[in-house]
Image (cartoon, rainbow, N blue to C red):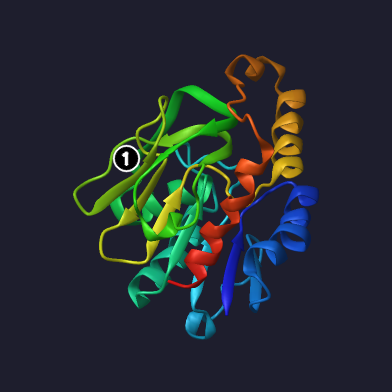
Amino acid sequence: MFLIFNTIIDIKARDNFTNVIAPRITFENKYSVLSLEDEIPDITDFTHLLVTGSELSASQGSEWDEKIISVINSFLQAGKPILGICYGHQMVARAIAGNHVCLRSSKPEFGWKKMKITNNRIFENVTQPIFIESRYDEVFILDERFEIIASNEQLQIQAFQLKNMPVWGVQFHPEMLLEDGNKMVERHLCQYPDDRKYYSNEMKDENQIKANLNIFRNFLNS
């Protein structure tokens, strides 16, 4: 069974992930959703862990850090596959390498961004990599235990894999299709209009993003 750790704070956005996005990315596989307020379950029955994005800041820390890192560490110790998205990507890096690997970005990213990806199994059948970004923080340094598998002109570490382990982090949001991504970013920019200066759209064809869900198919097959 697939465990989704939904770390989203906003109730409407959290419920949308649980009710709309989670079924899309699990491909009819059984899954369970853990929210921040929930009691941590026994992980014995779970095969995979997904840590979602969040309004929380990995670089600034929060009251939830200990709980989130505890769940990640339990899967790490069991050798089970892990995928972190955006904030989840940053928290997986923190759990493995320490708090110092995350910082506040000098230039945040919002919008659809092209990526350079390596020949990594998590990207199988992703041929035109472009993903929605919505971030203030970044993973800016990793040690030799990690392989950097995606980057763009603005950020060197857009995705990583823990070498020889089924553990990945992606700074972008592969779960977001066109409408989802546009709504997420526009909601943020309406709330924080000064961030519009960081927005850009590098997408030329919306069909480019349809293959992004293969990341989750690949993850579930790991």
Point out residue 127 in the picture as x, y percentages from the top left corner: 49, 47
Q: Residues within 10 Å of mark 1 (few under 14, many from 20)?
A: few
User: Where is 155 relative to 207, above or below?
Assistant: above
Residue 128 or 186: which is nearer the viewer? 128
Q: Quadrant of residue 184?
A: top right
Q: Residue at x 53, y 85 (%)?
A: 45
Q: Residue furthest bottom?
A: 45
Q: Position of residue 85 (x, y in %)?
A: 52, 50
Tell me the residue at 64%/75% (across/down): 31
Residue depicted at 76% across the width and 32% down the height: 187
- Judge whether 32 appears above or below 125 on screen: below
- Depth check: 116 or 182 in front? 116
Asked whether residue 33 is in view, the answer is yes
Quadrant of image for the C terminus: bottom left
Q: Secondary structure at mark 1?
A: helix
Q: Which residue is mark 1?
A: 100
Q: Is residue 12 left or right of residue 23?
A: right
**Quadrant for the N terminus in the image:** bottom right
* Residue located at (76% from left, 41% from top): 179
Q: Is residue 137 left or right of residue 212?
A: left
Q: Position of residue 84 (x, y in %)?
A: 48, 55
Corner quadrant of residue 133: top right
Q: Name the outermost residue toward the left.
A: 144
Q: Is residue 145 left or right of residue 202?
A: left
* In-image side of 28 versus 190 (left or right): left
Residue lying at the far right of the rendered structure? 12
Q: How many marks?
A: 1
Q: State whether residue 55 appears in this view.
A: no
Say which amino acid is labelled 1.
Answer: His
**Place of residue 203 in the rendered image (x, y in percent of width and height, measured from the top left):** 61, 30
